[in-house]
Image (spheres, grey):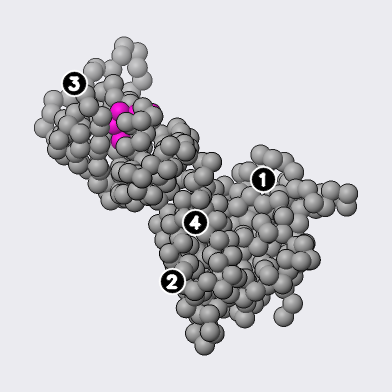
Amino acid sequence: MSTPKLIRPQISQDNADKGWVYHLSHTDLDGYGAQFMLKAAGINTRCFNADYRDIPLAVDKIVEQIIEEGEPASLLLTDLNLTLDQADQIDKRIKKLKVLTTLQLLDHHATGADCAAKYDWYYLDTERCATKLAFEAVADLMPQDQRAQFALRADFVDMGDRWLKDEPLFRKSLYLLGLVMQDDHLAPPLADLKRSYRFHLIEHFFQAHERGENLESIERGLYDVRKNFLVGRIDEQDLNNPELPLNDKFHILSASVLDETTVPMLDIDGVRTGVFFNWPHDVWRGVIMDMMETRHKMDMAIGVRGNGKLSLRANPGVDAGAISAKYFRGGGHPGAAGGELRDNRLRDLDHAVSSIKQTINPAPPVATAKLGSMITIQPPRKGAQKK
């Protein structure tokens, strides 16, 4: 099978390199690898990543951006095995757009066969992973002297993603797969920064591999590779502080970037409080320490789990334990406390914030007549008609 070329925005012949490709891909090595290939080819891309369950939400976000921009665009999906219902919904959404938008999907999961049979934009090839399909789709747009190198890189990802155990580099490919999936210690809302970090890891891994380094050598050098990502992104004094663990330096980077668009702030009894939803605990701990103590962006932080469980941390002068006891059926120390919300099935950050607001300022109860209560019945007004 011959992989189709990348469909680019249909602007004009003179502006073939203009316009945006909105690239939605999976959250593993193959998903990021496909985006890595488009980046290497110099394509104007706006990247998004989603697990299978989050595909509809991600597409909604992309469509909103396309409408806001108002310019011809392309939507490319890679390494995402759609259900037939998802494919139907995406097809309808793109066709209804008043902004000219092309649709293309490159995937290798055999369970998408029914979608591929129904839609010509759904390209399925079970013999190549998404990274390899993406490379072949843009190879002609890469500099001539880089094509052979990136072809080998695509083959390398293919070994691990499609579990080609007989290939001599299989275990090395699996190592890269695991490396990309490891916790990056960056804040969950910072999707673009997290993607840049993964591209940084992938590029440096391949450079070491192409120099002939073995896995032990690559692993020994990983600390420096991770630290190099922070160069120019955090203060040099923090970067080179030998008493700061590397993970904490990534937390400092996150704290420097986060604002109220990613961390909503609430006023709870006069205390400026940041709300965080489903963050890894170690990342949450490190980021809020810098946001509260160094940057003074807030005086209390509430970490919320999907099951409604809460962790509260506060600056000196704020009693997190008392606040939790007052509102959240919990308690603890002034600086650290736990609690819970009545709602134990929280969907996302907006839902968590809404639930906290409702807990702090509950809606007044609706007056209802109870059984046995006295109800005064007013006599009919004079002149009222009887029925």
Q: Are marks 3 and 1 in contact (CB under 8 Å)?
A: no
Instruction: Residue at the far bottom: name it.
Output: 166
Q: Name above or below for residue 266 compared with residue 100.
A: above
Mark 3–mark 1 Cα distance, whole angstroms, equals 60 Å
Mark 4–mark 3 Cα distance, whole angstroms, equals 78 Å
User: In the shown orientation, is residue 149 left or right of residue 355?
Assistant: right
Q: Give the range drawn in magenta.
A: 297-301
What residue type is disc 1 on?
Ile
Which label number is shown at residue 376? 3
Instruction: Residue at the far right: name it.
Output: 14
Q: Which residue corresponds to the image point at 47% horizontal and 38% vertical from the top-left?
A: 236
Judging from the image, what secondary structure is the residue with disc 1 in?
helix
In front of the other: label 3 or label 1? 1
Which label number is shown at residue 66? 1
x, y percent for residue 69: 69, 40
Q: Name above or below for residue 254 compared with residue 357.
A: below
What residue type is disc 2 on?
Glu
x, y percent for residue 43: 72, 55
In this view of the protein, which residue sits in the foreground, 85 or 144? 144
Q: Which residue corresponds to the image point at 52% horizontal and 44% vertical from the top-left?
A: 231
In the rendered structure, does residue 300 fall within the stretch colored magenta?
Answer: yes
Q: Mark 4 points at which residue?
A: 225
What residue type is disc 3 on?
Thr
User: In the shown orientation, is residue 63 left or right of residue 179?
Assistant: right
Q: Which residue corresponds to the image point at 44% horizontal and 66% vertical from the top-left?
A: 219
